[in-house]
Amino acid sequence: MEETKPTPWGETTVVGRPIPRVDGYERTSGAAVYPLDVILPDMLYAAILRCPHAHAMVKKVDLTKARQMPGVRAVLSDADPEAQIPWFASRGGQAASRLFDPHCRYEGEEVAAVAAETPQQAWDAVRAIQVAYEKLPFVRDMDEALKPGAPEVQPGGNRGATPSVSNRGDVVKGFAEADVALEETYRTCCEIHTPMEVHGSVAQWDGDRLTVWDTNQGPFPIQAALSNVLKLPLSKVRIISHYMGGGFGSKLELGKYTVIAALLARKAARPVKLFLSREETFLCVGNRPAHSLRLKAGVKKDGTLTALQLTGMGEVGAYPGGTSAGAQVNQLYKCPNVRTEETMVNINAGQSRAFRAPGFPQGSWALEQMMDALAEKIGMDPVELRVKNFTPVSQPQGNMPYTSAGLRECLTEGAKAFGWKEARARAKGTGPVVRGVGVAAGMWGSAGGPPSTVIVSLFPDGSANLNMGAADIGTGTKTVMAMVVAEELGVPLDRIHIVHADTGTTEYTGASGGSKTVPSDSPAVRSAAFEVKSKLLAMAAEQLKVPVEGLALKNGEISGPGGSPRVAVLDLTALRAQRAVVGVGTRAPNPVDKTARPFAAHFAEVEVNTRTGEVRVLRMVAAQDSGRVMNLLTYRNQVIGGLTMGIGFAMTEQRILDSQTGKMVNANWHDYKIATAKDVPADLTCVPIDMHDNDWNNTSTKGIGEPATIPAAAAIANAFYNATGVRITAVPITVSKVVSLLAERRKRG
Amino acid sequence: MEETKPTPWGETTVVGRPIPRVDGYERTSGAAVYPLDVILPDMLYAAILRCPHAHAMVKKVDLTKARQMPGVRAVLSDADPEAQIPWFASRGGQAASRLFDPHCRYEGEEVAAVAAETPQQAWDAVRAIQVAYEKLPFVRDMDEALKPGAPEVQPGGNRGATPSVSNRGDVVKGFAEADVALEETYRTCCEIHTPMEVHGSVAQWDGDRLTVWDTNQGPFPIQAALSNVLKLPLSKVRIISHYMGGGFGSKLELGKYTVIAALLARKAARPVKLFLSREETFLCVGNRPAHSLRLKAGVKKDGTLTALQLTGMGEVGAYPGGTSAGAQVNQLYKCPNVRTEETMVNINAGQSRAFRAPGFPQGSWALEQMMDALAEKIGMDPVELRVKNFTPVSQPQGNMPYTSAGLRECLTEGAKAFGWKEARARAKGTGPVVRGVGVAAGMWGSAGGPPSTVIVSLFPDGSANLNMGAADIGTGTKTVMAMVVAEELGVPLDRIHIVHADTGTTEYTGASGGSKTVPSDSPAVRSAAFEVKSKLLAMAAEQLKVPVEGLALKNGEISGPGGSPRVAVLDLTALRAQRAVVGVGTRAPNPVDKTARPFAAHFAEVEVNTRTGEVRVLRMVAAQDSGRVMNLLTYRNQVIGGLTMGIGFAMTEQRILDSQTGKMVNANWHDYKIATAKDVPADLTCVPIDMHDNDWNNTSTKGIGEPATIPAAAAIANAFYNATGVRITAVPITVSKVVSLLAERRKRG
């Protein structure tokens, strides 16, 4: 079959405009049925008993009392043969545990589960389970973990077997060529995703078919993982993820809770709802791992980078996991000699997972503060230094050219919008309260691609169905995709019905992660709508008895070059006869000789009270090159959300493990501080670098979610330095840390 | 795009075999969720107040007390502006009424409705509605209706404005050429569909989007009708019809109950379930209209038909409706001179609707008894007479050839299986109990066609999704369609997930009516599966580095002509990379120069107790040409069901309207007699004439549902005549009728 190939859009009428969400009413009125809202007849509620110790061996689980508790309909533990499921530490990783592993390597590991008539009965029954634990010594950070003789989290020691190394050129030679070389250790904390919606599933069996309403970022990968674990054909596992209240990476993987819900439902022969408590989501569904990053950089006086060398460690928790802070060090700037070496360290804490640009904010925290320090050393403006080291090619991919690369534009347009030169020149203030400005740049490591299949059907009254596999994880995916249909076919947004994120009723696409939903799926939507349009044009040609070439669809009418002959789409007799015109679109492969990346430059102004140590972010500007801006409103939402998370990363967030018990002391929204309205300034400016990346895909898009958060924290740190002359190398920038750093500096004089 | 064009199947491995239903477990275990089983959170239950009089004018509706009844959340009547909906008497017909019309033209017309917390509260509230009716005189059958000065059901009189006339050749000349001409009046009764599942809907609004779980035979036409009535875009009306407990034509049209459920749900801002009681389904959701058919036929001594003339009347109920008993008279046998004239008569009773081969069993009741009488007159075997008048062309369509026409084979193969010659020759018996055998033939008026779009996707573990719009109305559609996928791709049936009959998630197809589901949709399924296969073969060609020509898929492996090279489908790396292969199939247009029809010949043996008047059907044989037999088991089910309905039509079923009140006296399953196990013999034989109609569509199918019931009743009547020498021209063949006919005959000597 011939591929339908739409050419790049000229002037657009819908795409690019700031359009409110098509499901805004449902989401804000409460009408939207999230998985947590699903109620099925005869549904049971489940709860999980979790290990209360940082490290322990389960010696005995006595379920006798629990079984006798009111309302209990099923219990599940490691004693059940069907629960003997090897558990994968990370996607595609090797089995490192099992569903209810007696060796509990962190606080919160699953020990047993109960399904009962009410949630309260389930929790009561969980409390009635009697467990004999043997407590084991634990390690709660990488320093402890790497000490000789430290308790072993995984057999063979706590240091990941093979460090991840990349090497380009010769760093020794590079440092020899440098006029200035600096070296510094940067540290980041463990952050928790804490999306508004807690994690959970509702599982229902229909014979040997399983349907799961699940909170996840992509139903198809969850379907694959669950069918693999339960040894069911893919066609017998249906995952529905219609509404979703945020994931940030924590909902990319199959959760044990989903498997437990499915097993309890089968055991009880009734549907089971299993949702985690807020506390459980702090302990058990992933985090952004803390990093320690030793970075050395060399630069010539003219600003040319000569060498970058990163030695990093990441605290990935109790099981093998991956995160790369080195990717950005390796790619963002032109540098002939780069070496990165990263080691994963196991500790007795919840496992890391992908978290909004995994590794990149950590890498940016190091690299971008280093760039700031280098600029100061050679007396060059930090924006200028970054522009100078711009590269239009992907160095780790053999200098493969980018289809578009707006890093320079991000830096220069962002600086202009921020008033960079003026702000740098302004007095910092002499009183106890000082001000400073900082910049940081960043890139993200992918820009989407196939597979994705989408179906669009147009009804004879001009309304349309859009059928796509992609989940809308709160980012506005449904709205953007509907806009593509509206652009292509002229159908008003409120006449487009969207069915999505359901492995039973939609076609395969990847998960909504990696900022790739728009660049992966919107081209498939456009292809599908384009096929519908092509069929309409062919119908018009036949009806008007003119060649199809030269006919165009505009404002609901198809007309020839001079506007004549013309026919309204709704007057196409063939459309009425067929009752619907169906188009199927797939995401075409990415070009083989080029690659794409989104870029960003963030600017921050902060105010520091040098007496109290209080730091306030006053304003930020984020200039982003993510290819075409599809919806200016949801684009801005993403950027503001990204900056907000960046502020949280820089200023407030950290998981705290108790030194005596190894248990998390702030596993709740009161003690774990995410950035609130009090921490985030109203003055957040989004500067879209609206480059249309026409060589990358047919909607010219690259993805915005993750690049919008990557450099934010480093920009704040650089602004802090600009205000105070003190380098703050470890997040978060807390009052106590600031006070002690400033006191130290005063001592040093 | 190039159309994928599968060639006719050679030997098949799945198609044609007797395969149990893929949803048999769900249907028999109670796991299947029929619309009646749908329970939504906060759902209300509704009930309708119906006019208790055969003809009345509503003078006043007082809802005050009803509103105050416990649990009542919404009431609806003609006083509500949103209920001022013009109502269409039949599909596409003109507005003849409105949703709650004060002029109630039959017992059961809708007067008001209530939604309450429980069904009981809804019914209690309905009883609390106070209505002042002005009773009007009524007419309860066509004889009364056509009397001068009869009460008018519709303005302008009770005789349908224009009789439906068809004319071919010159009947006067035809009768002049005949050696024998006979004339007789045949009468049939009004039958009620009474499917096991009662009619109803569950309506839920989500903002301005409406979802309806509905008992119907085709969600897309219901979507179109409902969106038209409520003035909503098609994309905002989603109809789900996943399981369905029989319709027989009564669930082809939008019900007032569906609109009422939607309006009550909007008013109460809660989901509403509205299901009819069994009694309501007898009164208000259609019937097979009674007919009076005056038929004259001329034949030469050698059996050549020379003329047929039909003057018919149908009692279509209180609103305009259509049914054609003439179509079969017009087409079944070769006859140069045919005139049919049919008039629809309105009476004060529920409106007729399509009912398993609308008009055809009535036409067959007349035509096939007439053929029997003609054969006797000219001394020719009844089978031979029918074979002699076989025609391979469609006479009303300008003698367009049939792609296949198995009427002769039905007659000869059926006669052989029945032992026709031997049975005719056998003594009828001399005691009070006599036996006889009879034959009747029939055809059905359509054989399906586009539009239909189907999507098949194959997963990398070899399981598949089948997405189709067609409803499975209890006939086994899901099983047949899954078999097509299994045949084409080698996927086991239990690894195929089917999503179907949902306007929100599947693509357009027509309703499951007219016996056209298999011939309309199975070719689209085959095209979709074929496209998947084509893509798999292309993948294999690339992987094996051989040309795609010559590669074939068999037993999960793709191999070259000599069985080498070969690769398992599950080892195709491109399939794993893509995660799914999607194929889209549409039903290709029917040929323009040929047409298709299904044919049938039924044979019956009956036993008549000439003293008591009891008639027992001893055995029946049904020989059917419906093109290819897709599933021998569901095919037999259809034939046995068709014979059973034919027995009911002949022997037991009739709506009885009280002469004093005009009200139906047997609106329940106790008094309305459908054929039961006691009426239906175990000895029902299905003789499939498995002609593969390769010129009609790519699965070579024509449809079985309706042709399986058309001639059954006439075969029984002919057997009765053969046993007794008495012609029974009016259904049903009741004991009292038989006793009086035999007594009359004895009187006449």
Image (cartoon, coloured by chain):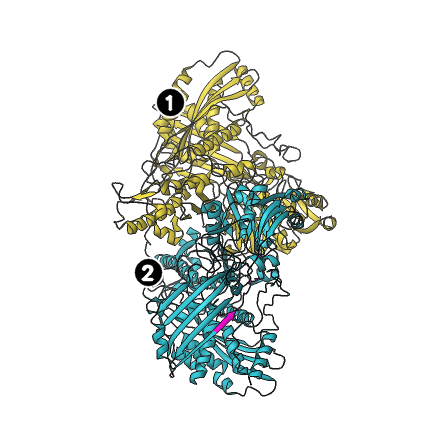
Chain colours: A cyan, B yellow
**Looking at the picture, does residue B391 appear above or below residue A6?**
above
- Report the front residue among B233 and B738: B233
Q: At numbered mark 1, what does the secondary structure look like: helix, strand or loop?
A: helix
Residue B184 in sight in this render: no
- Which label was assigned to residue B416? 1
- Report the front residue among A233 and B38: A233
Q: Quadrant of residue A736?
A: bottom right
- Which label was assigned to residue A546? 2
The location of residue A116, given as percent across then percent down, is: 64, 46
For residue B734, side relative to residue A440 (left or right): right
**Residue stretch rendered in magenta on the structure:** A185-198
In the rendered structure, which amino acid carries the disc numbered 2?
Answer: Val
In the rendered image, the quadrant that contains the C terminus of chain A is bottom right
Q: Same chain, marks 1 and 2? A: no
Q: Residue at x 64, y 65 (%)?
A: A670
For residue A56, side relative to residue A702 (left or right): right
Q: Is residue A152 magenta?
A: no
Q: How many marks?
A: 2
The location of residue A502, given as percent across then percent down, is: 49, 52
How many other residues sit within 10 Å of disc 1, few (<14), some (14-19) or many (≥20)?
A: few
Are dots 1 and 2 in contact, CB under 8 Å?
Answer: no
For residue A156, side relative to residue A39 (left or right): left
**Looking at the picture, does residue A501 appear above or below residue B693?**
below
In the rendered structure, which amino acid carries the disc numbered 1?
Answer: Lys
User: Which residue is most to the top?
Assistant: B430
- Report the front residue among B177 and B167: B167
Q: Is residue A187 magenta?
A: yes
